[in-house]
Amino acid sequence: MHTMTMSNTLDSIIDRIFDSYAAIGGINHLHGPNLPSMESIVRIIYDFESVMFPGFKTDESIDEQNLRCTLGENVHRIVRSLSAEVCKSLAFGARDGSSNSDGSCLDPAELEGSRRDADAITIALMEKIPAIRKRLRMDVEAAFVGDPAAKSREEVILAYPGVEAVLIHRIAHELWQMDVPLIPRMMSEYIHGKTGIDIHPGATIGDYFFIDHATGVVIGETTIIGNWVKVYQGVTIGALSVKKEEANVKRHPTIEDEVTIYAGATILGGKTVIGRGSTIGGNVWITGPVPPGSKIYNKPVDYIHRRPPASNLA
Amino acid sequence: MHTMTMSNTLDSIIDRIFDSYAAIGGINHLHGPNLPSMESIVRIIYDFESVMFPGFKTDESIDEQNLRCTLGENVHRIVRSLSAEVCKSLAFGARDGSSNSDGSCLDPAELEGSRRDADAITIALMEKIPAIRKRLRMDVEAAFVGDPAAKSREEVILAYPGVEAVLIHRIAHELWQMDVPLIPRMMSEYIHGKTGIDIHPGATIGDYFFIDHATGVVIGETTIIGNWVKVYQGVTIGALSVKKEEANVKRHPTIEDEVTIYAGATILGGKTVIGRGSTIGGNVWITGPVPPGSKIYNKPVDYIHRRPPASNLA
Amino acid sequence: MHTMTMSNTLDSIIDRIFDSYAAIGGINHLHGPNLPSMESIVRIIYDFESVMFPGFKTDESIDEQNLRCTLGENVHRIVRSLSAEVCKSLAFGARDGSSNSDGSCLDPAELEGSRRDADAITIALMEKIPAIRKRLRMDVEAAFVGDPAAKSREEVILAYPGVEAVLIHRIAHELWQMDVPLIPRMMSEYIHGKTGIDIHPGATIGDYFFIDHATGVVIGETTIIGNWVKVYQGVTIGALSVKKEEANVKRHPTIEDEVTIYAGATILGGKTVIGRGSTIGGNVWITGPVPPGSKIYNKPVDYIHRRPPASNLA
């Protein structure tokens, strides 16, 4: 193709894409406030990890001399970035109907209000860091105790995806409880992509929670999980109904304290309660309540062709 | 180890690795044209996402003033990079036997031909962007309507891995249909790594397609999927036979319109058709045809140890 | 919030987080030697991939003129970085009780010893590269032969997550056998996040190993796998017991030569041996030995609601 023709063709293509932005609504975000940026959210997550597990996530040697300084820098950077992203989220929420249902942009007074709210939310989250760290120590302990392959707590912090996913969840859940739109789900989706663990930020999760092997775990929005619960790869704690009009009811199970759920098990429904101390075997499918202390396994299934065909043996 | 010895040892190791490049064939790409670069493919994917969902994937504020300019830059960048990568792919394809079975490098005339073909293919893909955007709007709608936990369409675009995987698939599939080697699979593998959704670029997928929770979904090369199909995590739409000599027959199922397939279901075989409006329950295993409107669930299995052992209760 | 108040609030938050570092032990790494850095490990992995598959993982054209030079640079960079990270790991291991159980920092003589050991371990690994490449060629061949959708060996190297995961495993396993703490698990967790394949670096894996579709595969620490074994997505080769005190016994199965394990199958237990030439069907659950040449499939389960309800048909 000649350069001239190529250039004309491209201009015409660009025109048609541009026109399609006006014609095809619903997937353009061009009017109104900016949306939160996934790139910023990811940087904020890195900084939170450094604050939560000091000395683990950085190339530089950290000791008591430089620790306070490094910590201060991290906290200031988180506050600056997170407050800006929360402000965008609140402006989006306001535009989206919560407080400003005509869909127009925020006026300066409203924007100033969003900024103040964003600062307050960010500070409220930062205030909770010592309490969150206390719980993360319990999560690390649960992983170390719960996996014979774990050689040290340091290995658990450096190389266990379940621990990282729960760390992010505990932060995202705080933002969720303060009604921040978009950001909690962006955080949970980032760590879902990284670890294969999909925990909705709405889920309520107790202490000493351990997810081993990670890939394929799904925990729904209205799930409630107690203390000392252990979950393996491929476990779904999900909804029976996916009717949009039931979005505000409890659609996901309650898992009481000291329950272990083995790989591939599926537990569904908002009225499903797995009683304290129960064990749910691998691949078990549950849609109703289970009394405390139960041990539920699938009956061994019948196999076919159990014996080897003679011709197949060496 | 003394520095001198260390240096000699390293030299000798490098020599032996270098020699192994000659001795161990089949995993070296040293002769002939360069292969497409995964790094470039990933940058092209980012740019496509910005073009498809303007205002969602960038840190900067986009409005109608700068939109045309940003769009133009993105389109030019995609065309420049993609055409170069497609050219490498076509040169590889030619070398690989399609048109130049002696394995030698392309001569200048052939290379010029590859360049022209690469431009034409790239332009043909860009021409389809408005049509692809129209279909992506339907995919976003299907996700928003299909998940009670989705609070807004913006959240769906920002944080639903299924939507991103389908976006990439719709682009990769166009390149696949134009017989571009390697690149469609590199695109699908990039998004497989990111989302846990493995859609072969050869698969044909209709409108309003929604994959929820993403992790572990596999959709094979010759699959055909209708409109308004919904698929959950861990679903396999795969082949019964994996004989290399059957590579050119339809090995994967057909899923008709308005079918829902719940988590962990497995549907196998090229002659398997799931009839219109059917529901396939979680973990169901299907290797034959299912009539339209069917609802197929596993019979509740028997459990063992259903009651709690007395000693286990607090 | 006024800037002044904001600044005071932040100072007080930083103080409280800082205090929590002293109060909440077990998740801080502040005293003693630095831990290995995940960022460095990831860069080392990239360099290993370039050395193993020359010409595949780089943007620049590689030919026989510049190959030796590029190879030399890569090898020197790996040796420098890996030796530094291994040294940190050994110092951590020494601190952790193996050779210095009082938990104090290493003295200069010990540190010098760690450095020498780290160099020796790194060189020993580099010496094995030609042998590892030989095995990787077999793994590529197994993937190409084993998947009808694979169009070329180049596609297998560029776009098959199973091949990349096995490459990293073969390197991590060598370090594991030389008793390097932390790094082997950091490598396996990096590639787990990228591909959804979780192979513990302790697992012993034979030649011509192929994992297709990748997501959700788990292979435990004491697993032994023979030659020409093929594994599909969602397969678990795991432990029956998760008692910490049994960490040193064989807890995971043995899979003999020429076994194929289809998607979602679960094979558990240290005494479980899957005999040579067996086929394990999708979703099959196995906790005991299987004789050679067996073909084991679940009996087709009963379905409910098999026929369509009249009202449901268009």
Image (cartoon, coloured by chain):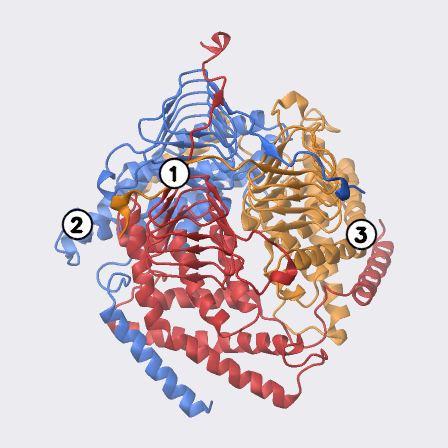
Chain colours: A blue, B red, C orange
**Residue drawn at (50%, 44%), measured in percent from left and top?**
A195
**Residue drawn at (80%, 52%), measured in percent from left and top?**
C128
- Badge 1 crowding class, 10 Å Cα cut-off, few under 14, some 14 to 19, many 20 or more, is many
Label 2 sits on residue:
A97
Pick whichever, C97 or B284, lies toward us: B284
From the viewer's perspective, is residue A195 above or below residue B104? above
From the top left corner, tell me how far across and down residue B131 is, in percent: 33, 71
Label 1 sits on residue:
A171
**Mark closest to the chain's N terminus, 1 or 2:** 2
Label 3 sits on residue:
C128
- Badge 3 crowding class, 10 Å Cα cut-off, few under 14, some 14 to 19, many 20 or more, is some
Measure how far apart labels 1 and 2 are at the Cα level: 26 Å
Q: Chain of mark 3?
A: C
From the top left corner, tell me how far across and down residue A49 is, in percent: 47, 41
**Residue drawn at (30%, 34%), measured in percent from left and top?**
A251
Question: Can you tell which mark lies on residue A311?
Answer: none
Identify the secondary structure beneath mark 3. loop
Identify the secondary structure beneath mark 2. loop
Measure how far apart labels 1 and 3 are at the Cα level: 44 Å
Look at label 3 and name its amino acid.
Lys
Look at label 1 and name its amino acid.
Ile
Which is closer to the viewer, label 1 or label 3?
Answer: 3
Residue B83 appears in the figure: yes
Identify the secondary structure beneath mark 1. helix
Residue C8 appears in the figure: no
Give yes or no for contact between labels 1 and 3 (Cβ–Cβ under 8 Å). no
Measure how far apart labels 2 and 3 are at the Cα level: 63 Å
In this image, A249 relative to A80: left or right?
left
